[in-house]
Amino acid sequence: MNQEIQNILNDTKEKMNKALVHLEAELIKVRAGKANPQMLDGIYIDYYGVNTPLSGVGTINTPDARTLVIQPWEKNMLQPIEKAILASNIGLTPQNDGALIRINIPPLTEERRKDLVKQAKAHAEHAKVGVRTVRKDANDEVKKLQKNGLPEDIAKDAETKIQQITDQFIAKIDEHLAKKEKEIMTV
């Protein structure tokens, strides 16, 4: 097969995989009622004038399925950590006992579970749009090559392969969504 076509196919897979990896990262942030240190990703603390991720100022553990414990490396960071968690608006209330911060993860109500499923579906749809955009760009590149002398049958084969790659990634996105949906709805 034409090297240019192979490059387009490889590039397409790489870009679609990035959309899938991004989806996985977003779905981890959608809490399913279980404590997970990654729920606190995206929370930053002012650490001596530097905006630092929460994981950069202490240790985050999950002693059980419903509790997160944050052990700051410096006691004077308890207050800023507590304030940052409250300000992050993730619906969790930190409890400061003077040595560490505990966060109890409340059980999810049926209504909240449905909202989280909607949120997960929105992330999945966003990933699908990303995959389809990559497909469109790849097909446009094939059409450009065809205008510059690429035989029509090779161009059609390339478009078919691009569609197969797209279908594979859409199926993977659906799998991730189904798994997350099951996790959220499991009481």
Image: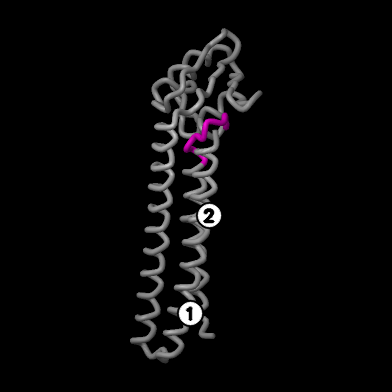
Q: Closer to the camera, 20 or 35? A: 35
Query: Type of residue at label 1?
Result: Ile
Q: Closer to the camera, 117 or 29? A: 117
Q: Closer to the camera, 121 or 57? A: 121
Residue occupying the point 42% across, 85% down: 155
Which numbered circle lies on residue 184? none
- Depth check, mark 1 against mark 2: the one in front is 2
Which residue is tagged 2? 175
Which residue is tagged 1? 5
Q: How is the image coloured?
A: one colour
Q: Are marks 1 and 2 in contact (CB under 8 Å)?
A: no
Q: Closer to the camera, 93 or 71? A: 93
Q: Position of residue 71 (x, y in %)?
A: 61, 19
Q: Secondary structure at mark 1?
A: helix
- Compared to residue 185, the image places residue 88 above or below, namely above
- Compared to residue 64, the image places residue 154 above or below, namely below
Query: Type of residue at label 2?
Result: Glu
Residue occupying the point 42% across, 84% down: 156
Residue occupying the point 40% across, 42% down: 119
> Is residue 32 shown in magenta?
yes
- Mark 1 nearby-residue class (10 Å; few <14, some 14–19, many ≥20): many
Query: Which range of residues does the magenta coloring cover?
Result: 28-36
Q: Position of residue 144 (x, y in %)?
A: 35, 81
